[in-house]
Amino acid sequence: MASSFLSVPLKKSSEVDLVKPLEKFIKNTYSGPGGTQDDFVPMLKELDKLRDSATCKTLDRHDSSLELIQKYYDQLCAIEAKLPITENQEDEPPTPYQIRVNFTWYDAFDQGMLFLGKMKKTMSSGDYERMCVLFNIGALMSQIAAAQNLGADDGLKNAAKYLQQAAGVFTHIKESMAGPFQQVVTPDLSLEMLSTLSVVMLAQAQEAILLKSIQDKMKEVIIAKLSMQASDLYSDAMKQAQNPHFGDLLPKEWIPTLAGKQAMYHAQAEFYMSLLAKKNKSIGEEIARLKHALELAKTGSSRAGSTMDMKDFIGKLQRAHDSADKDNNFIYHDRVPELSNLPAIGRAVVAKALPLSKPMNPKFTDLFEKLVPLAVHQALTGYEARKADVVNREVGRLREATQLMNSVLASLNLPAAIEDLSGDNVPQSILEKGSAIKERGGIEKINQLIQDLPELLQRNKEVLDEANRVLDEEEKTDSELRANFKERWTRTASAQLYSPLRAEGGKYQSILDNAIHADTIVREKYNKHAENITLLCKPEDLPGKIPSSSPAAALQGSKCVTDLRQLMEEVETIKAERDVIESEIKEAKTDISSKFLSALAQDGVVNEENLSVGELDRMFGPLQKQVTESVSRQEGLMAKIQTANTEFCQQKQASGSANQREEKLKDLAAAHDAFMELLGNLEEGTKFYNELLLLLVKFQTKCNDIVFARKTEKDEHLKDLQENIAKQPSQSAPTPPAYQASGPGGAKPPPPARPPPPQVQPQQQQQQQQQQPPAPQAAAGSQPPQLNMPQAGQPQYGYNNPQYYSPPPMPTSYNPYATMQYQPPPQQGAAAPYGQQPGAPPYPQQQQAAPPYPQQQYAPQYPQPAYNPYAPPSQYNPYQQQPQR
């Protein structure tokens, strides 16, 4: 009794391009320093190649093919949260940065029809792609199991393993993936079909374990329980496979095979229980079970038909039954119990649907490991914004306090005033300030930065203006079409769709306006201190530009000077400490992404605000405390400096030249501070404009993409509207005048009925003929003779006489419009044709004689041409020669 397993066919798919849409999404969504998103292009190409190999090419029934498709499935799961491929809802407008990849999959069981082809479904959904790929994994597992050598132990082990895994795959699809797609997927992914496939795989796995137990010669009771469980599973599979919704979808050999195996393994369970009864000397039970097994086996053979060969098994049962029955008849004489009185056979549930392992391929490596899930990326973006706010706020506090301290010291001409007591030499602090300016690039650096700044600003404005222009043009076109078509223009209004883009553009415009105002302040400061900054860059010119004063040697060792010098040292200490604090604030880092990932894995969502605020407090709390302490120390220090400087100024001998020198030194010190501030502002402004330009270019690309999509949608919608308008019926025609009205059925109204023919007495007719002279012979080529008009007293024929002339009836085949054939003159003695006087020559056939009286319109009893009230009277002549009958 050789056994074979049923296998599930693979779903087929069409090729798609994954590189372009995913690359566009990465560039527009994930931002990295130095453009690191370009490094993902090789990974995207490898992913595209992997899909083509796993879904579009023929896969062998081998472990290598299974590893390939498992690797692709694992990669799809890895990018699920990083590169979400989704489909718009019907009421949602298209978004420019949404990943749209249309995956097409064909039904696995449908063989197609001649003209209709196979059933298929196309969706732009990463979940749909993963579900179809996972279905193929389960199908390929069933095919590998069916290809195993069931006569070997390893083959049975592998078959049982793959079938249990396949059952787990189909169960997972049914319970976790297929629910949202039930209204749109092909029949092979319906819940009923997935449940059927899972039970079939589980029954076959139980069968493989059963065959292994038979090969291992386990106890009869164990084999019987395994067989009974296999029979129950096949019974369940057979019932589910007969679902009327499946129709002819399943292969034709499935239901006979399932029905045959259900009966066969029930029979096998009874057979092994009979062996156990034989060991226990229960001959009656043995015979009863063998008889039942034989009935089941025959039933299974009839059900299976040609799909299974059960002759050997039936013969084995028959021989065992005959032998036991013979022995009982001659030896034991044991009573054979009824089938209902036999002990029930237990079940050994061994085969189970194995859960999916993650990853399915143990050798899997994520191609996009550097990318974090999109939710984590968004959380990181929010965290970086919060961190930048804290850094800018604390650094701003430090710099603002330092600038205030420098401005106060410059107004007091410190420390230059206590260094230049002689009044002739250039103070050392001024020389140091000049050297510091030259090391940072001098006035040339400032000039270059100020010159480049308007160009950067102009580039940003042009990009923003262009983005707004394309939006304005498309919105104007949409408004015009909406005004023309009114309620038939049903797509989303551009003004409503562009509101987020307008808000974003307004934000950028506000940023540019603030930047322009800040640039104006920087230029004013530059104009104020440019001359002194230039002088500090030329130390050789300083002695000639600084006024001299009378010596004040008496103050050289005074207490106020000593106090001021000590206070200046404390000022330098505070400045050095602030440089360190500022550096620590800017360089502060933490691994917040791991916390976001942990929160996403644990809760399924990332609470960015709570996590970010807690982490920032932990990281910047001590540094914020140092900033506050530094600002507080400065307040006390400046108060001491002002007190000591007041005492110093009182002791110093004041003179005009001394005041001029002191003012110049103050200006030089202020110029140094202004240079440092200008350099920092201009460098930050240049960096700001460059970074803003990248954002504006991205914003412009977003606007161009959505405008292009809207134009395409507009063309399609406009085409549909024009086609619908062309198909609409025209307006009804105006009512025709009364004379154009038609009769019933569209025919012309019939002419008035003819009155009865006139009653002419024979005697009067004879008198009329006698009074008519013979007609003259017509000359050759002349007109035919005219008929004589009736004489006075004779009846008049016309509209004035109510009695009309009635001609003889016409032949049934008469056609008044046909050309009449020429009739030769009648022979002597023959009767003249109707309408011709005896002895008169015949009329020419091409012309008709003039009517002898006003001709009335004649309505013969044969089809008439269309009635025209404006046509001339009919030329019918009742006296014209008629065709011969």
Image (cartoon, rainbow, N blue to C red):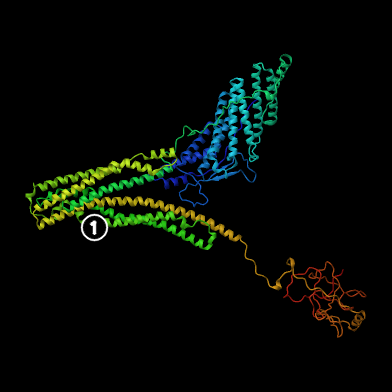
Q: Is residue 824 left or right of residue 252?
A: right
Furthest-top residue in view? 331
Measuring from the top left, give residue 805's x and y in whole percent: 84, 77
Q: Quadrant of the C terminus?
A: bottom right
Q: Quadrant of the N terminus?
A: top right
Furthest-front residue in view? 341
Measuring from the top left, give residue 241's x and y in whole percent: 63, 36
Q: Can residue 36 be seen?
A: no
Closer to the camera in the image, 785 or 586: 586
Q: Count residues near mark 1 (Cα–Cα under 10 Å), then give few for <14, some for 14-19, many for 20+.
A: few
Q: Which residue is mark 1?
A: 527
Q: Can residue 219 be seen?
A: yes
Q: Residue at x 43, y 43 (%)?
A: 375
Q: Is residue 520 above or below residue 292?
A: below
- Which corner quadrant of the image does residue 311 belong to? top right
- Which corner quadrant of the image does residue 111 belong to? top right
